[in-house]
Image (cartoon, helix red, strand yellow):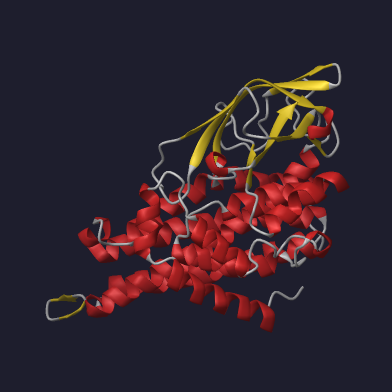
Amino acid sequence: MDISLNKTQRDIAKEARRFLKKECPMEFVKEMCEDERGFTEDIWKKMTDMDWMAMRIPESHGGMGMDQMDLNMVLEEMGRAVFPGPFFSTILLAAEAIMASGSDEQKDRYLPGIADGNLRGTLAVNEPDGGADTGYIHMAARAEGDDFVLTGTKISVPDAHVADVLICAARTESGNDPNKGITLFLVDPAEPGVSVSLLPTMDGTRKLCVVEFKGVRLSKESILGERHHGWGTLKQVLQRAQIGLSAECVGGAERVMEIATDYAKIRIQFNQPIGTFQAVKHRCAQMYLEAESARSLLYWGAWAQDHGDEKEAAIAASAAKSYCSETFTHNASSAIQILGGTGFTLESEVHFYLKRAKGNEMALGDPAFHREQVMGLLQTNGIDK
């Protein structure tokens, strides 16, 4: 296993940092927090011109066919910039699902549009009673002849208000086992019976929605993958998304550490910088240690998605999501403690990181859920050495 970065990946990270420093300063982030859409078409086009939308799309469908680690270079920098907008939902959720199990016709229909920036999508999984369990899917898709009728509610659906296609996980067979009876459907948000509304959230940099399906009739051509066997695809997509979210967390954790240490060098108390005080020095050192530890776990997780076996990929995704998201929250909280009251002001940027950190911590399964997943996988399957 080699998780060191190659020249291409280092170049991607360098260009992404340069681009986001110019196009996504904190003033832009603050503006997008107040904007209902949460992004602008101008920055979306510029990102398309950078080929970010095409990175994971196969070359046969207008993309570049790159690995998870390559995409992570961009996502880390997005985490450093607290980047708003539907990039994550489109690339890590919708595109991955279509690539994993779409028919040739479905791939031809959607993937080129995603790669060239003309189509945005998202994945609707979470339900009101599901909590952190990503496998809790009870929303019904009732068969009526050759059609299916979707009825139910999905919550915390990222960027559904600007999506051109929704991928909805629904139950086509009764039961509680996620391995049986779950089917993925491609849904046009403009279909009769679909309603999308924004959720009020703490983190304004990522828009979450409630999507209600009231007797939405879909043809069998809307099924993504195999009927009743959508969990395999969904699990794979969620694992890659968990790694992508972990990359954001590592970038954010590193950035708040830099903000805190820079502040500790210039903030004077008792005629000396507060960075000379042992308690502050130790806190900054701990932030650095945790950020670097999280990066190592992240890179293993990214490698495992492309090169590891199924067991290792699942364990690595849950381990990375649990540790990296908690590290981001710890570092953001520590940064606010070092900055003191100024960290909470609107003029400061640190509280935006803390809000994103808390949102990332809860998304796609919270740390407690993922620790249980790791424990269960190790007990039942172990891991190849």
- Tell whether 269 sits left or right of 317: left
Which image quarter is the C terminus in?
A: bottom right
- Where, by quadrant of the figure, is residue 332 drawn? bottom left
Which image quarter is the N terminus in?
A: bottom right
The single residue placed furthest to the bottom in the displayed view is 7
- Tell whether 103 sits left or right of 199: right
User: Front-most of 232 and 197?
Assistant: 197
The single residue placed furthest to the top in the displayed view is 144
- Where, by quadrant of the figure, is residue 103 drawn? top right
Q: Position of residue 281 (x, y in %)?
A: 32, 75
Q: Position of residue 4 (x, y in %)?
A: 68, 78
Q: How many marks?
A: 0
Q: Position of residue 107 (x, y in %)?
A: 81, 49
Q: Is residue 318 visible?
A: no
User: Front-most of 281 and 318?
Assistant: 318
- Where, by quadrant of the figure, is residue 30 drawn? bottom left
Point 64% across, 36% down: residue: 125
Q: Is residue 118 visible?
A: yes
- In the rendered image, the vertical position of residue 55 relative to residue 126, given as above or below: below
